[in-house]
Amino acid sequence: MWLETDEIDVARMIQRENLDVRTVTMGLSLYDCASESMETLCRKVGDKIKRFGENLVPTVEQVAMEFDVPIVNKRIALSPLSFIAASTGAKTYVPLAMAVDKAAKEIGVDYIGGFSALVHKGLTYSDRVLFRSIPEALNSTERVCSSVSLASTRAGINMEAVKEFGRIVLDTAHMKPELQGLPCCRLVCFCNAVEDNPFIAGAMHGVGEPEASLNVGISGPGVVNAAVRRLPKDADLGAVAEAVKHTACNITRIGEFVRREVAKRLNIECGILDLSLAPTPAMGDSVADVLEAMGLERCGAHGTTAALALLNDAVKKGGMMASSYVGGLSGAFIPVSEDKEMAFCAEIGALKLEKLEAMTCVCSVGLDMIAVPGDTPASTISGIVADEMAIGMVNNKTTAVRLLPIPGKKAGERVDYGGLLGGAPIIEVNPYDSSMFVGRGGRIPAPLQSLKN
């Protein structure tokens, strides 16, 4: 049998509990593509993506067919393009984004990440060019994803970049209002960004990574939900944690097999396995459903943060038993639009922005895929980002923000994208002004625990 276990009912998990491998992501270094000419850089980057990635999609599809394991997305993560394009001295990186998108389309990958800048301590000229290029780049492409690192536990929060990011989010959403904020689904900011993240929109191939590597992100909230619901009604929370751990271990074994098999066939290095429970809009494939299976009437009720903390910890503990190369983000995602029950709870008022922010203290990432009114001020978006960056900085964890301002829509209305992106209600934001605080700029100093050497 392709899995070294007698315990896992793979067919049941796939057919009835929505188990899939969410993404196989090739990380690719572009440092050897640097050039003083933007035209030459675009050509070299496109050629390298196609050379290394031409067999990615057919190989993944072959493995999925041979072993009857659904693999949803095929992706590529690139070295941060603000590094690669710096030597060009160009005033816009939109041509580079379009070249990357063209190459990704030719080899058939779903998304390609790396239109990225790491600015948690300051911005270079190249970083500023990339920042300014983001709105047009994302509105001119279909597959390119952009991420920026705005804060870290060791550096603090770059409030100049946070202020600028708020404007960028709004500009990206409003450049083509008819897209209803869709390009913002490919834009995220981080505190304590990880450099081996296989998940979009934050995927990039960081410093210290090999020439090419193969990273896998698993899924499986439906499987965990089913495992929790099979427990006796009087099972205590210790028993719940054990059930989640055992299930996470089983799910991870499947991802570990896929990681090794695809890397071997492509003759590239094995990267990491990301344990994150990534929900979908499919019925029953929801992190919120898991929390409600633990005993909450609705996700968002008092006790939700504690239940999510249990889930996140148990997923990590179980997954670590099945792979020695765990990385990425690893835990439980809480993206509102991509989680059917989470979106419903937001629609009925059980989940509000403040509760979602509290939950990010213990989840895998942060405020994710949250639709907000299109007339939300840039300073308010920057304030939301600053709050989330502070949570990550002080707690020494990765946090992120992916907000979707929806042009022309108000709180209580709805946006629907379909597919894995799902749909969600537009959530009300606090109406009070934070522009003076955000406008001060500067850098919020790193907390004392950053001094660990």
Image (tube, grey):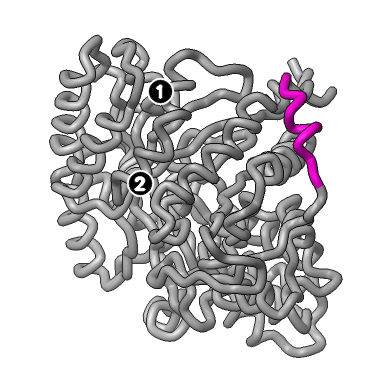
Spot the residue most to the bottom: 233
Q: Amino acid at mark 2?
A: Asn
Q: Is residue 233 visible?
A: yes
Residue 197 to residue 376: above or below: above
Q: Residue at x 80, y 44 (%)?
A: 433
Q: Residue at x 17, y 24 (%)?
A: 44
Q: Which residues are magenta?
A: 433-442
Q: Position of residue 306 (x, y in %)?
A: 81, 63
Q: Residue at x 77, y 89 (%)?
A: 233
Q: Position of residue 68 (x, y in %)?
A: 27, 73
Q: Position of residue 446 (x, y in %)?
A: 77, 23
Q: Residue at x 32, y 50 (%)?
A: 111
Based on the displayed image, in which of its 4 quarters is residue 445 positioned? top right
Magenta run includes residue 53: no
Please report contact status of discs 2 and 1: CB closer than 8 Å, yes or no.
no
Residue 139: numbered disc: 2
Q: Nearer the viewer, mark 2 or mark 1?
A: 2
Residue at image mark 1 = 82
Magenta run includes residue 436: yes
For the N terminus, which image quadrant?
A: bottom left
Residue 134 to residue 185: above or below: above
Q: Secondary structure at mark 1?
A: helix
